[in-house]
Amino acid sequence: MKKIILIILTFLSIATIRSQEIENLSGELLGKLLEAKTDLPLPYASVVLKDSIGNIVEGVITDEEGIFRIAEIEVGSFVVEIQYNGFQTFSTNALIERNRQAVDLGTIRLKEDATQLNEVIVTGETSQVSLRLDKKVFNVGKDILVQSGSVTDVLGNVPSVSVSPSGGVSLRGNPNVTILINGRRSGLTSNQALEQIPSDNVERVEVISNPSARFDASGSAGIINIVLKKNKNEGLNGQVRLVTGIPTDLRVIGSLNYKTEKFNFFSNLGIRYTDYVGLYTTDQETNVDGSLVTLNQRQDEDRHDDGQFFYFGTDYYINDNNTITAAFLRNETKDGDETDLNYNYSSSGIRDSTLFTFGTSKERRSYNQLEMNYTKTFEKEGKKFTMDLQYDFWDSTKDFNIETSQTFPTVQEISNLRTTSDQKNNDFALQSDFVTPLSENSKLELGMKYEKRLVKNGFLAEELAGQDFQSIDGFNNDLDYDEQILGAYTQYGNKIKKFSYLLGLRYENTSVNINDALGNFNQTNSYGNLFPTINLGFDLSEKTKLQGSYSKRINRPSLWQLNPFSELSDFNSRFSGNPNLQPSFSDTSELALLITGEDFTLNPSIYYSFTNDNIDYYTIRSEEGFFLTSLTNIDSESRLGVEISLSYNPFKWLGINGDINAYTFEKKGQVESINLNASNETWRTSWSLNIKPKKGLNIQSRFNYSGRNQNAQTTTKSVSSLNLGISKSVFKDKGSLIFNVSNVFNTNKYREEIIGQNFVIDKLSNFNAARWTLSFVYKFNKKEGEESREAKRSNRN
């Protein structure tokens, strides 16, 4: 690990040592680049300055706002040439006549190149990974590995992001990440809900490891922002997708869009009927009064999900400067699961007894989201005011019936249980943002946000006694959760020649109250905190940029982490939250390079974070004989890592995207008599290969690997997986046939070993075996050269 860090540090040091003699350079050239049809900025476009005989004098890349500047230019006549993939090349003459002259080319609007775009549509069937200094952007596009799947599948293909077999999302190996939908918190970001959203509804995924003050301060690892599609093409257009697969996977996904001069109506719809097969095993050894007691547990799970998803809304263009957007989203699912559990107990190597449990469950979830946006622009370019409102209301209910019998040494019924869990949420968020340029290179941003979340959570377990069911002590509880967060921020950015900076400060006041229906538990926690952010950038050359950043972030314990009441689903193990958990605070720093070439982009970085009161897991064996997992605040956790991301296109028919992340961490803490001190080094990598052997045909593969990871009690073994896909354009490129296989060799299995006081537990979780899907997509009334564009909403950019 130290060698890797030394190599990267050396590389960064060499890159920063650059000097040159500047003589007789006095003028400068500036301008702004927009897309002609939508007036959206075109970031990272190539701007080249050539002399009278065609030699390149200087070159730069436009920034996030599409702005470019070339400084210290000799007096003379030049040609400015601007190129952006999929658009017509723009060129114009520029004359520098005297010292200190500034030539402003104003706003340049590039027109789409229909010929180039058609070629991209036919041969460019894969997603694009845009590596930037402040974030990585994964444009879902026509990625054949995720087209027929869900948002979870999309995240599994995003650089720096890993998804565990159970659906847990982590960023650079850190699970304390905040997931947003369209720039805002949403109930759709829970693991189960992400599995319900069709990948066709996702425009792009933004990975922000060190966010500015504009973003919420939650998530010590950073932010993953999922931006949903909203078509903005003229006229009527849309698409429909049909999916079938093994295990049973039937889906119909469609979108429809109609745009006029004053209105833009958009809609997305998804219906699915899906089966999943899971396998879980547990082998444990326990020392009880000097005797070795073992348990071999096997759980076979058949899951079935029915789901309906739709998202529709409209943009109303009041005039050139005022726009109102309203949209409604609904996600409804009905799940039916069957579970077989076999428990084999042995003592001192002799089989003692065997239990068999059969469980059936039915779960119903209904999620609704209403969102509204008002955007006002001004005559002054770059000045903008936005107001966003979001209201979520959703509920879920799960009924679980558990029948347990003994099959050895005698056959007899043991118990008949039934459990009911339900949850209702009401979430409200109001946000306002204002951006104004103060000068040609500086701007000021201000904003406020208010969030209120109300949750009612209940659980009841009953056991059959005679002819009636009676509640079990300790498993009949209702919990109310009330969270309010008031936030405000300001940030100022400026650029001085090749140096740029963005300084921000955010304040968030949090109030959380938890109480149970019986009045036995009532706890309130309120705190207010400042969160400074610093982002610095320096252009080493026209193709090499250096950035340093710092941010302070918070990880608030969630409801399930605070809930002191455990649910009953397994006789052998339980989970219980800790209502005394406190938020943890992280200081995160990062140093990164962005190097762009004609056919590649390289982004190496070094990052470090230190967290106080880090939230960590621990497991104990209770006096009743079951294993209880809970959480506690440990003293601290420090992380030091290096990451290298690469996008390489050596040929028109070949594309390679890769990401390597290696890090070391150290944890310090203790709970009761359990020492939770730990340190470890690990790494992960992800590589995708895109091959276009001929027109209309595309082959894609992706390999993921996560190395062995060890904490104080738990060792997670390495895991790897391979996904493959192939697509073929049909019907004159209006349709596509896509075949893909996820988890090809069924290797995506989560293995962990837990070592505690007088016990050892080995677990294997195979949440989802290999899946084979075939899909057909057809687009209608879509004009050639048009692409989907996201809404012009500040909190979605």
Image: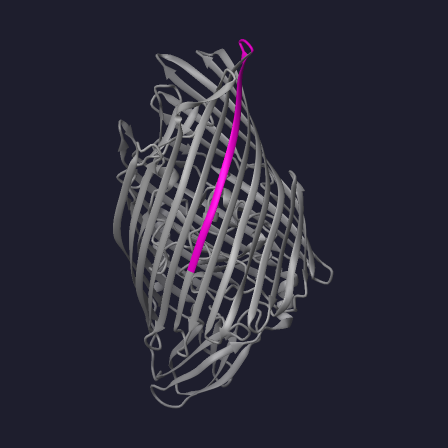
Residue extending farthest bottom: 97
Q: How is the image coloured?
A: one colour
Q: Nearer the viewer, residue 161 or 355?
A: 355
* Residue under the image location 44 percent in, 68 percent down: 375
**Quarter holding the N terminus?**
top left
Count of marks, rendered view? 0
Residue extending farthest top: 410
* Residue under the image location 37 percent in, 63 percent down: 432
Q: Where residue 551 sits: x, y (%)?
A: 31, 55
Q: Nearer the viewer, residue 176 or 661?
A: 176
275 vs 268: above or below: above
Magenta span: chief secondary structure: strand
* Residue under the image location 40 percent in, 71 percent down: 384
Q: Is residue 2 visible?
A: no
200 vs 304: above or below: below
Q: Where residue 259 sits: x, y (%)?
A: 59, 68
Q: Where residue 230 sits: x, y (%)?
A: 55, 61
Q: Nearer the viewer, residue 250 or 538?
A: 250
Q: Where residue 408 sits: x, y (%)?
A: 54, 11
Q: Is residue 416 found inside the magenta-colored segment of the image?
A: no
402 vs 274: above or below: above
61 vs 340: above or below: below
- Report the span colored magenta: 389-411
Q: Is residue 390 found inside the magenta-colored segment of the image?
A: yes
**Quarter holding the C terminus?**
bottom left
Instruction: Locate residue 253 relative to residue 486 in the image: left or right.
Output: right
Q: Is residue 596 visible?
A: yes
| Among the 4 quarters of the image, the one containing residue 20 | bottom left
Residue extending farthest right: 731
